[in-house]
Amino acid sequence: MALFISSLNSGSNGNCYYVGNNNEAVLVDVGISCREIEKRIKRLNLSMQKIKAVFISHEHTDHIRGLYSFLKKYSVPVYITTATLQFSRLYFERAAVKNFKPHETVAVGDLRVTAFPKLHDASDPYSFTVSCSNIKVGIFTDIGLPCQNVINQFKQCHAAFLEANYDDEMLNNGNYPYHLKKRILGEKGHLSNQQALELFKRHRPSFMTHLVLSHLSQNNNCPKLVEDLFTQHAEGVKMIVASRFQETEVYYISSSNTLLQKALNPTQLELFA
């Protein structure tokens, strides 16, 4: 069974990632409004009814901004740690909230979602992998340094959303105040283009087919720069740069090493709506 993936939005203005199969799907983070999620899901010929759960990585606003309105309209469980919920200052009906533990696998239909700790300046930050049968997709954003958890999980992924937040030169020469630059550059900040590229070059598995470069800084990065940098080292991996303004296409991830670069066309996607 294959997985379908899309970045619905990626950046400091809001993050939301879709991973699903033919029958069910999950969202990782809900940093844009429920209305925008609905619009983008519709444009992709996907189905809101197939979203069966939400997983929250940490409490920063760009990852939870739309969560309250989304859960008010759609009765799905939200998987969130106690600390993240506390620091988010959001309140939900008890039945909607599900806790998860490090390295615990949560079943959502045929999907298996595994959470693992990462380095970031939040109360209890996690990244996730989503798998189905023998296919695995990772969501690796908001990471200061690639810790062993991140490396181990990245090595197992057929596709990944990987943070490439800033270009070192643009950040160092930019007008951000010193304390903010220090935060971004720190081990609990964000991954630079070069750090992300090094992770990809050293640890990507031979069966990886798609890499979605994610969470680009509006002020300290450039989509073309990221695309050009990673394309030089792609070696057959499809490179996609996620937008902070719109959704990506839906990409079809299978166990085959044959690149199915683009998602299914709209007519084919209707089969899964």
Image (cartoon, helix red, strand yellow):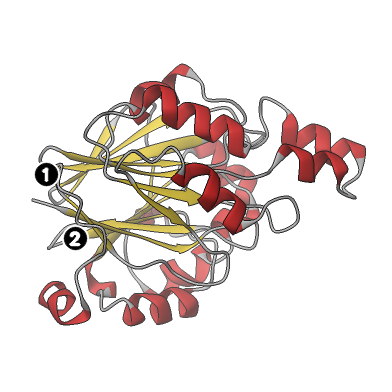
Which image quarter is the C terminus in? bottom left
Q: Amino acid at mark 1?
A: Ser
Q: Few, some or many C-alpha atoms within 10 Å of disc 2 (few <14, some 14-19, many ≥20)?
A: some
Q: Amino acid at mark 2?
A: Glu
> Which disc is residue 256 wearing?
1
In the figure, 149 relative to 209: above or below?
above
Q: SS class of the residue under badge 1?
A: loop
Q: Are marks 1 and 2 in contact (CB under 8 Å)?
A: no
According to the image, label 2 marks what residue? Answer: 24
In the figure, 100 relative to 119: above or below?
below
User: Cα distance, mark 1 to mark 2?
Assistant: 21 Å
Q: How many labels were placed on the picture? A: 2
In the figure, 35 relative to 228: above or below?
below
State whether residue 90 appears in this view.
no
Q: Position of residue 39 (x, y in %)?
A: 41, 82
Which image quadrant is residue 132 in?
top left
In the figure, 257 relative to 46: above or below?
above
**Residue 232 or 83: which is nearer the viewer?**
232
Q: SS class of the residue under badge 2?
A: loop
Which image quadrant is residue 185 in?
top right
At x 35%, y 81%, the residue is: 43
At x 25%, y 58%, the residue is: 261
Q: Position of residue 264 (x, y in %)?
A: 19, 69
State whether residue 147 appears in this view.
yes
Residue at the limit of the structure toward the top, as seen here: 148
- Horizontal arrangement in the rendering, residue 200 relative to residue 269 (left or right): right
Q: Position of residue 20 (x, y in %)?
A: 23, 57
At x 73%, y 27%, the residue is: 186
Sooner in the amino-acid sequence: mark 1 or mark 2? 2
> Which disc is residue 265 wearing?
none
At x 50%, y 72%, the residue is: 246
